Image: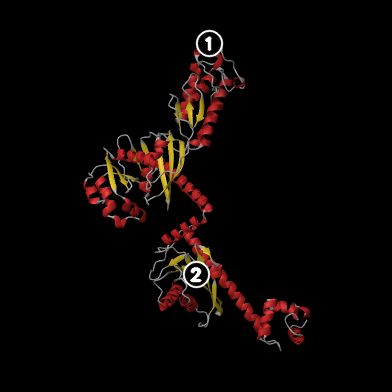
Amino acid sequence: MFNYKEELAKIPHKPGVYQYYDKEGTLIYIGKAKDLKNRVGSYFVKEHLLNAKTQVLVRKIQQITFTIVDTEIDAWLLENSLIKRYKPRYNVLLKDDKTYPWIVIKQEHFPRVFWTRRHIKDGSKYYGPYASVGMMHIVLDVIKELFPLRTCNLNLSPENIAKGKYKICLEYQIGNCKGPCESFQSEEDYDQNLADIKDILNGKIGVVTNRLKEQMQEAAAVLNFEAAQFYKNKLDKLANYQSKSTVVNSSISNVDVFSIAIEESYAFVNFLKVMNGVIIQTQTLEMKRRLDESEAELLALAIPEIRERFKSLSREIIVPFELDIQGDEQLKFTVPKLGEKRKLLELSLKNVAFFKKERLLQYEKLNPDLRTDRILQQMKKDLRLNVLPQHIECFDNSNIQGSYPVSAIVVFKDAKPSKKDYRHFNVKTVEGPNDFATMEEAVYRRYKRLLAEDEPLPQLVIIDGGKGQLGAALKSLRLLGIEKQLTVIGIAKRLEELFYPGDQFPLYLDKKSETLKIIQHLRDEAHRFGITFHRNQRSRKTFKSELSDIPGVGKLTVEKLLTEFKSVKRVKEASEEELKKVLNLKQVRALKDYFGENNPE
C-alpha cells in the first residue's frame, strides 16, 4: 500500500527531478524542483487546492523516484531530456514534430552551399534550423545573387583538377560559377566568398557591408567604375535583404526571445533568435496543457526543448516574466521593461497572440463546439458567474407614450439565438407609461410559468435598462423565491454599463470583448422582437377600430379581413371580387358604401 509520508521522508531538500509511477509501474509524470521535498509534498499536503486533473494524477501515484542534481539549471535540462525520452501521460508535450531545414556549407574542396533536412556529423558547417522555409530560401537567393558558387557535386580535388578531368558547364557560361573545375577560380578566392557567406548566415551583415564598401571604394579610386558598380549592386541587394530582416539595434547579439499565450487546454510559445540585431530564426509551437499548468510552468518546460531543437547556445534568454529558474554564469534570464530588448519581446508577444488567434479559429471551424465552450467560459469569467451561462434570457419593454405596452423576451442557448423560445407579453396590470412596473409584470409572469411547467431556469437573465429596471425584475424574482437560483444583470445603453443587484458600481467590459458582443446581440434581438410585436399590436388595434363602425361587419369578420388584407388601405383598394373571398355580398356593399361616404373623391 502506497504511503506518501514514508516516501516523502526519503526525499531531501535538494534541487532535482522527481518521477511518479502508477500501480503498473508506468511512468506517468516527471517534474523538476529547486527543493524536492517541498515540491513533492505539496501534491499530497495541499491536495484540496489542486485542480481536478492533478487530483486524478495524485490518486494514481504508487511509487516516487527522484534524481538529485547540483543546480536548478541542471534540473531544468534533465527534466526536459526525460520528458522527451519517456513521454509520460500527464506531462506537457510540444505538438510540433516537423523536421526543419538547414543551410549547410559542405566540408569539401570548393564547398557547396545548399539546404537540407538531414543534419549529418561529417564536418560540414550547418546553419539553422529554419522554422520558415520561405526565409531560408530568401537567404539562399541573396547568397546566390551576391556570390558565384558551384552547384555541381563533382570531386574538385587539386589532383582531379590538375588532370583536367572536368569541363566548365552552362553555369559558368551564364555567370553563376567562376569555373573552379578548370582552375579558372582559385580555392583562396572561393574561400573569400565563403567568409562573407558565413558572416551573413551568422547575422553579421554589417561586416559584409563594410567589406563591400571598401572594395567599391578601392575600385573607384583606380577608375575601375565597372567593378565599382558591381560592388554597389551587391550592396543594394544586401541592403534590401537587411531591410526585411533587421528589427532592432545591431548591438543585441546572440539572444533568444520567448513569449507564451494560453487558452484553456492549449498553450502557444513563440521563439525568436536574434544575431547582431537580425532575427535569423522564428517559430511558434503549440503545447497541450495536461494539468492546468501556469504560463510560467509551461514556458519553463518549452524553453529547453525549443533551444535543443534549434541548437541554440545563446547565453541570454529574454522572457515576459520571471521564471522559477535561477540562471548561472553561462545563462541569463532577462525580463526587459524598456528599450530595444523590450521591443523584441513585444514583437514576440504579437506573434504568439496572432498564432493563437489563427489556430483557435482553425480548431473552431473544424469543431464549432470548441468556440461555444470558449465563449461560455469567457462569459463566465467576465461576468463573475459560478456556472456556464448556457441558457440566457433578455427582457425589453416597448410602448409609445404608454399606449399598447408590450414586453419581449429572447432566449440564447449556447451563445446562439433560440428563436423558437422567444416570447412576448401584452401588459395587463399596468396603466400608462410605467417601464418599471411593466418589467416587474413581465419577469413575474415569465418565471411563474416556467416554475408551474417545471421548465429549467436560465443561468443568466439580462434586463435592458439601468438600476430601476433591474430592481423591478429583482422584486419579481424575490416574490417567486428564485433570486438566488439565477444571476440577473442590467445593461444601460449609453455607456454599455452592466449593473449587478446590490452593487453601486457598474461593470465595464472591453468594447471588443466577445462577452459584451453577445450581451449586445441579446439586447438588440429583444428590442427588435419587442418593436415588431408592438407594431403588429398597434396595427391590429388600429385596423379593428377603423372597421368596427361598418354596419354588418362584426368582430369575427374584422379578424378575417385582417388576416387576408393586413391593412385598412388594402381593404379600401380591394375589388368586390377580392372582398367576396372573405365577405358576403351584403357586407361587401356595406363596406364599399362606408368608405365611399368617408372618403369622397
The color scheme shown is: secondary structure
Whether label 1 touches label 2, CB < 8 Å: no
Secondary structure state at the residue bearing disc 1: helix
Disc tally is: 2
Question: At 27% across and 53% down in the image, what residue appears?
Answer: 44
Secondary structure state at the residue bearing disc 2: strand
Q: Earlier in the sequence, mark 1 or mark 2?
A: 1
Q: Nearer the viewer, residue 503 or 381?
A: 381
Q: Residue furthest top?
A: 163
Circle number at residue 162: 1
Quarter holding residue 313: top left
Mark 1 vs mark 2: in front? 1
Q: Position of residue 298 (x, y in %)?
A: 38, 46
Three-letter code for the amino acid on which mark 1 is drawn: Ala
* Quadrant of the rendering where the C terminus is positioned: bottom right
Q: Nearer the viewer, residue 430 or 282?
A: 282
Residue picked out by circle 2:
394
Q: Residue furthest bottom?
A: 551
Q: Position of residue 355 (x, y in %)?
A: 48, 46
Q: Is residue 567 visible?
A: yes
Residue 468 sits above or below residue 263 on the image = below
Q: Residues within 10 Å of mark 1 (few under 14, many from 20)?
A: few
Three-letter code for the amino acid on which mark 2 is drawn: Cys
Q: Nearer the viewer, residue 17 or 360?
A: 17
Q: Position of residue 600 (x, y in %)?
A: 76, 83
Q: CA distance from mark 1 to mark 2?
A: 90 Å
Q: Residues within 10 Å of mark 2 (few under 14, many from 20)?
A: many
**314 to the left or right of 13:** right
Q: Position of residue 11 (x, y in %)?
A: 23, 45
**97 to the left or right of 332:** right
